[in-house]
Image (spheres, grey):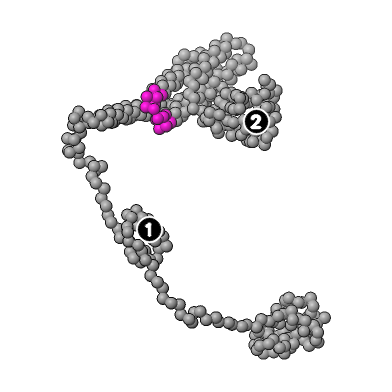
Amino acid sequence: MKSFSSIQQLLATLSREQKLLSEMFEKRKVLSFNYDYALEVVEFDADKIAALVDYSVIRQNGNNLELDDVFLQFFEQVMEVNEEINVSYINEHILSIKQNIIYYLQENVETRKYAYLRQVKHALRKIGVIAMRNVVDLNRNIDNTFKNEPNYKIKKTKLEHLDVKRHDIYMLIERTDILVSGEEEQTFYKVAADEELNRIIVLLKLQLNECRHNLIDIQKQIIEYLNRIKHQSGVIEKLRQIKYLKDQFELGSKTNIRELLLHNTALVFEPNPVYPLNISLDQLQADNDALDVIRKVAKRFRTSVKATQPLAANISDEYLETLVQEEIQINLDEVKSSFLAGGNNLFDFICGYDFGREVSFDECVTIYCQMISQFDTLFKITDAYNTRQDVEFAMVYPK
């Protein structure tokens, strides 16, 4: 197995294969991530998958792939989606703080003393973050266990185990509080007298206090969930006994169920009221889906009545007569060709042209404008103007 030689190489590898790693992280709870699908994600470049396997970023088991535990834990912690509650981290940091305090008090060189002090600060900061994250993970796991676990016995066992985790977190918080309060290491806090250390301790106390309040709420929630499970399991056990007696035809003889049902006036035992609603005839005539609904109802009741379609009246002969309407269209190309063959100006030419039907003065103006807009390259448009019936027009001649 290879190992990364630098941070740059590690980041470059993760960035280059981010699409595959994102897919595998999203499907980390799936039992198997198929190699063929991973090959499709990396565009069928098997060398990319082989490189990740060589650097232990992913592990291959036959035709299945999965993220290595180190990288999986790293991604879950950074994205704050880790479901594992590990209280040993807090205990390790408490031990590390105590050891570095001893080293600090025994060291005479200032630079080395400052290095031990930095380790104490680092551990104190991490304790606060880990404690807050463990409380959040604990609360999420409790909700997921109660809502998603189908087996009542396993659900109860998991909640009891999570309650033990809650107690462990609480005890470690108390140990941390005693450690930073100065009751055990009074000499260190007097000798160190560091301003940054004091700020870290104040922040850590606030975080621990918030964790205490959340743990109290979590304890109440666990007790409530356990009581619900106890009640639900008791109900299910009673239902199983009733089902057994019913299957054995002994329910009426061995229980007082008839007497209880006679005196029970719960709404669930009442018949469902029916409120008939007649649809209006206007809606039946106007709604296109009404006929399909009527057919479905008739089919369900299997009625023998057959609906007959009324015959429409004969169509009048007037509607069958063919009417022809003729309209003479003006061919502008033909008008253009005739105009180019002559020498008159365009407007006078149009007014005197034989279109095969009577053309009004307004239509002549329209044809004049259409001719100029379509065939302006073939005409000579002058600066001279003329007027006819209060309409001013340019004098246009053939080129």
- Residue 21 in the image: state x and y as whole percent: 61, 32
Residue under the image location 46 percent in, 29 percent down: 136
Against 301, residue 108 (above or below) is: above
**Residue type for callout 1:** Arg
**Closest to the observer, 15 or 32:** 32
- Residue 185 in the image: state x and y as whole percent: 49, 14
Write the start and end of the magenta stretch as one range: 143-159
Residue under the image location 65 percent in, 85 percent down: 362
Identify the secondary structure beneath mark 1. helix
- Residue 245 in the image: state x and y as whole percent: 25, 29
The residue most toward the top is 106
For disc 2, the marked residue is 14
* Crowd class of label 1 (few under 14; some 14 to 19; many from 20; radius 10 Å): few
Q: Is residue 137 visible?
A: yes
Residue under the image location 53 percent in, 30 percent down: 30
Marks 2/1: CA distance?
64 Å
